[in-house]
Image (spheres, coloured by chain):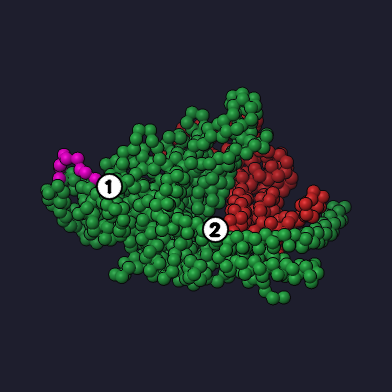
Amino acid sequence: MATLLQIHEPGATPAPHASDGGLAVGIDLGTTNSVVAVSAAGKPEVLRDADGKALVPSVVAYAPDGSCIVGGMARNLLLDRPECVVGSIKRLMGRGVEDVKALAGVLPFDVDPQPEGETGMVRLNVAGHKLTPVKISADILSALKERAEEHLGYLVDQAVITVPAYFDDAARNATKDAAKLAGIEVLRLVNEPTAAALAYGLDRQAEGIYAVYDLGGGTFDISILRMEKGVFQVLATGGDAALGGDDFDHAIAEHFLTERSSEKQLTGSEVKMALMTARLAKECLSEENSGQWVLDIDNVQTMHSLDRKTYEGLIEELVERTQNICKSVMDDAAVTPDDIKGVVLVGGSTRVPLVRQKVAELFAKEPLADIDPDEVVAIGAALQAEALTVGSDTLLLDVTPLSLGLETMGGLVEKVIPRNTPIPVAKAQEFTTYMDGQSAMAVHVVQGDREMVDQNRSLARFELRGIPPMTAGAARIRVTFAVDADGLLTVSAREDSTGIEAEVAVKPSYGINEEEMATMLFDSMKHAKDDMESRLLAETRVEAGRNLNAVSAALANDGHLLSDAEFNTIKAIVQKLEEAAKGDVRDAITAAAEQLEEATKAFAEKRMDRGIRSALRGVDIDALDEKASSS
Amino acid sequence: MDGPNTTTDNARAGEAGVIACWSCKGPVAQITPLCETCGAVQPPGQLDHYKRLGLAVTFDIHVGELDQLYFDLQRRLHPDRFVTRSPQEKAISQLQATAINDAYETLKDPFKRADYLVHLRGMDVLPEGCNLVNDQELLMESMELREALSDAETVAEIDALSMRANDDIKLCIEQLSTLFNNDDIEGACKLTTRLKYLQKLAEETCIHRKKLI
C-alpha cells in the first residue's frame, strides 16, 4: 500500500521549511540586556549585530510620534533625553500601581498617577506617551525578532522566551502578552536557570545534581536540578524577583549622592543619570581595585572615588540575601553542598568578584562560568525551541516557584499547591457555604509562602455564582487549580451535589484586560488581522494532519477489515484532504475533513468491534488463570 | 447513533478494558497512554498511582526504579512533546503529565505513599474533615517532643532532637513496610499518623534551628 502520509515520531519530524515560518528562536528577555539565539541540528548560535555584540540593552527610546529605537542607541540617548528613554522595564512586569508606589523614588520611572481607586497595570510617562510595561517589553521583543529575521532571512513568529524562575503568575502572563503584541507565539515560557542548565548540561554531558545561581540585572534565581540522561529535573527553586545588579547600581548611586550632600529632590531623569554613572563604576570595579567618577547633575559636577573594599561593603548585605535564599532552597531540595556536583553561574552580575567569592564559600567549590553568563540562558532557550519544534530526547521537568493558596477566615492563607511541586499540576479544593441559601462565594487566590494574605501577592479574585439554594454547609463546591507547563494558573469550579458548573474567568489582579489587549493589537496593525487568519489556517492544517495520520495508521493496521470498494472510497477522500491541506482555503480543508470523518465511521465500528472481541477473549483467559491460581 | 457509542457496546468495551481512541476511533486499551495504531495521546482516565507508573502495589518502592518509570512516561507524554500538535492533543498531554506528576509525588514520599496505600486498602488515615487523633500514646509523645523543642535553647539541643526525630522516622518507615507486608492495614494506618507527626516535628526543628542561627 502506498504511504498516505508520512508518519513522524516527535523526535523525527524534519525541520520546517522557511515558508512555514522557519526555525523558532530562543529569547532571553532580560532586565538590563536581552539576547536572541537559534539552534539547528543541536548547534545553538547567538545572533550578533555587525559589531559582534550579542547583548541588546533592554532600553527603549521613544519619539513623540510613538516610534521607537531599542538597544545601545537608545541607551546612548539616556543622558541627553532621559525623559524619552526607559530601561529595566522587566521589574514592572505584572506589577500594579500599588506595588510601584512602594518602590517610588528608588526606580528611575515616571509613573503615571492613576485616578483614585483605579487598579490595573501601571503606566509610565515616556516622551509624552502613557506606556504599559507590556507595550515596552513588546517593543524590545520586536527588535529581537527583527534581528533574528535579518539573520535567518525568513519570518520568525515562534519563540521560547525565558522568565525568572521566581516570576509570579502576573509577570508570566504579562510576558506572554508582550510576545503576542510583538507578533510572537510563545512555544513555552522556560525558567532562566533551567534554560541555563540545559545549555550547560548538553554541552558538558553533565550528570548529577547541579545548582544554577542566576543573578541578573533585576532578578535573582537559584535552582537545584538533577541532570540524568537528558532529563533535567528541577528539585527546588527560589529567588527574589526584585534583587539584582540594578540594586548594586542603586547602592553606589546612593553612596555618591550622599557624598554630594545635596538636599534637592532629584527628578526621574537625574536619577537615571546617577544610576548610569554608578553602573560604570560597578563594571570598572569588577576589574580594577579603585576608580574615580564625575557626577554631573543640574550643572553641578562632583568627583567621587570608590575602592573595591568600600564598594563590597555597600553590596555585601545584598549578596548575603542571595546566600540565605540558596540555603533555604538547598533545604527544600533536601541536599547539602556536598551533594552538589557543580554550581553554574548565570547573569552579568555574577561577574562581580564578591558574588563569585561568596558563592564559592557557600557551596564549597569553585563555580563554573565557562559558558558566557550573559549568553547561556538564550542558548538554552534556543535549544529548547529546537527540541519543542523539531524534536529531541531531552526533557525539562520544572516546578512551581511559589505556593498557591486561598484566603480563608481571618486573612490566613490555605495552601493548595505548595512550592516546588512539579508542573503541570492540578489540585482540587472543596468549599461550602456558611449561610442558608447562599448563592455566591468570593474566592481570593494568592501566590507566596507567607502566612497572611496581605504578605503574599494577590493573583486573582473571583466570585462563584449560581450556587443552588441549600442549607449552610450543604453545597459542595469543588474548585480546581491547574498550573500548566508555562507555570500559568487556570481555575475552574463546579458544585458537586447538583453538578452545576460555575464558569470562572480568572482576571489577574494586575493584568492587562482583554479590551486593552485588543486595542493594542489593533494599534499594531502590522500583524493583527492577517496574523489571525494565518494562525487559523495553520491550526486547521495541523488538525487535518492529525486526522490524516490517524486514518492512514488505521488503514495500515486494519485495512483488511474493509472491502476493496470501501478501502478505495476512504483513500479517495484521504487524497482529497491531503490536496486541500496543501492549499490555503480553510473551508475546503474543513469540508474534506468532515467528509473523511463521515466516511470512516463504519470502519471505526468494525475496528472497535474486533478490538473488544479480542480483548474479551484476553479477559476470559486472564480470569481463568486467576481462578486457577487462587484455587 | 453509531455502534461504539451505544450503551451496550460501551459496557462491553468497559468490561474488556478497551476504549475508542479519540483520534483514529479504533480500539485502545484503557491503560495505554498512546494509541498503538495512530500514536495519539489518550486521556489519563482513572488509574491508581501504581498502575499509572507501572509499579507493583507495595509499600517498598525502589526510588531509582520509580524515577526511571516516571522519566520514561514524561519523555513520551509531557506537553513539551506536543507543542506542534493540535490543541486537543496539547490539552490531553497536559492532563497526562499532570496525572503522572501526581502519581510520582504521591509515591515518592513515604508518608504520602503510606497514606495512599492505606486508602487503596479501604481505610483512611485521617478521614476528611477529621483532624482529631484518637491515639493517647501518640498524643503524649508528640506533646512531649514539642515541649522539648520549645524548651531547646542551643543548636546542640535542637540537633539532638532533630536526630531523634529522623531516627524515629526511619524506624517508622521500616515498621510500616513490615505492617503492609503482613496486611496489617489497621496497624499501618496508626503508624502513618505517627509518621505524619514525626515529619512535622522534623520540619519544625529545621525552622527552629534557622531562627537560632
Q: What residue is shown with label 1?
A: A128
Secondary element at image label 2: helix
Which residue is more in the foreground, B80 or A521?
A521
Q: Quadrant of residue A63?
A: bottom left
Does A117 sit left or right of A410 as displayed?
A: left
- The secondary structure that most of the magenta stretch takes on is loop
Crowdedness of circle 1 by 10 Å Cα count: few (<14), some, many (20+)?
some
Sequence order check, earlier mark of 2 and 1: 1
Q: Specify whether A293 is left or right of A628.
A: left
Task: Look at the image and give the residue range highlighted in magenta.
Answer: A260-268
Residue B21 in the image, given as x and y percentages of width and height: 70, 58
Q: Which mark is residue A536?
A: 2
- Chain shown in red: B
What is the chain letter for disc 2? A
Determine contact: label 2, label 1, CB under 8 Å: no
Figure check: A452 above or below B66: above
Residue drawn 64% across the image and 71% down it = A5
Which chain is green in the picture? A
